[in-house]
Amino acid sequence: MLKFFAKYKFFGIVLFILSSIIITIIYQLLKPAPSLPIYQPDMVDRTLVDSTVQYVRKYHKIADFKLINQNGKTITQQDYNNKIYVADFFFTTCQSICPIMTDHMVQIQEELKNDDEVLLLSHTVTPEIDTVAQLKRYAVKKGVNESKWNLVTGDKKQIYNLARKSYLVTKSQGNGGKYDMIHTENFVLVDKDRQIRGFYDGTDPDAIETLLDDIQTLKKIEHRQ
């Protein structure tokens, strides 16, 4: 009996390896492809969404925009054409959640510094304070990579409309005076079709790891299309 097993030991090992390979291939073929939701306004907390779009159930996209970055350059949706990007809202004089959020944006920037498919976009919510010069000082201080990350200022109404009507992230409408401002911790993942694919707590390290994973998932989705 021992001689029998010894004789066919090699064939048994080969058969085991082949079986493992076949099982792995079948598993990969049957495994569902990775996916991410496409967020519509009616899927989000209504307090964060402008009343004009609260009941939209499909075809929601980030609206066209025209803002100015830390170098005085005009930035529009065309600068993000065919790119995945992460957007947020902040202000340079914030002493609470913004420094944490900015540090996490720096982390994302470093993780993806060689990935040309992914960009970052941070909107100031105090454009009357965050001039181009102020944004430039802040960008230098934080180590912003200008080819990957735009800090933008501009018309306050446009920025607040983007926050409530496009990115769906704030309760404030920005019409209550100087100190009625957006104060949201949300990072928003946007795909190449300007659709929202995820919301993440920009102050939570675990959420940032999830965001980085979701970016890779989104890249796979985009490449399949």
Image (cartoon, rainbow, N blue to C red):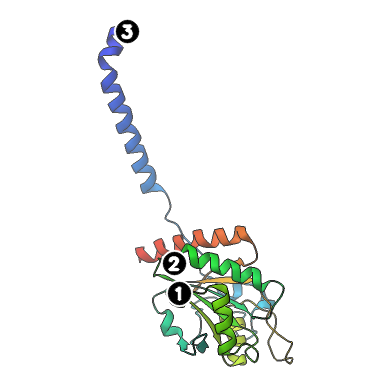
The residue that appears at 39% across and 43% down in the rendered structure is: 27
Q: Is residue 161 above or below residue 146?
A: below
Q: Quadrant of the N terminus?
A: top left
Q: Is residue 171 visible?
A: yes
**Residue 9 left/right relative to 77:** left
In this view, the residue in front, 171 or 66, is 66
Residue 171, located in which quarter of the rendered image?
Answer: bottom right
Circles 2 and 1 in contact, beta carbons < 8 Å:
yes
Q: Residue placed at 39% from the left, 70% from the top? A: 116
Q: Which numbered disc covers residue 2?
A: 3
Mark 3 lies on a secondary structure that is helix
Q: Residues within 10 Å of mark 3 (few under 14, many from 20)?
A: few
What is the quadrant of the C terminus in the image?
bottom left
Distance from disc 2 to disc 1, alpha carbons, whole Å, reads 8 Å
Under circle 2, the secondary element is: loop
Gap between marks 3 and 1, in whole Å? 66 Å
Q: Which residue is mark 2?
A: 113
Kind of residue sitting beneath label 3: Leu
What numbered label is drawn on residue 148? Answer: 1
Residue 215 is situated, as x and y percent measured from the top left of the image, at 47, 63
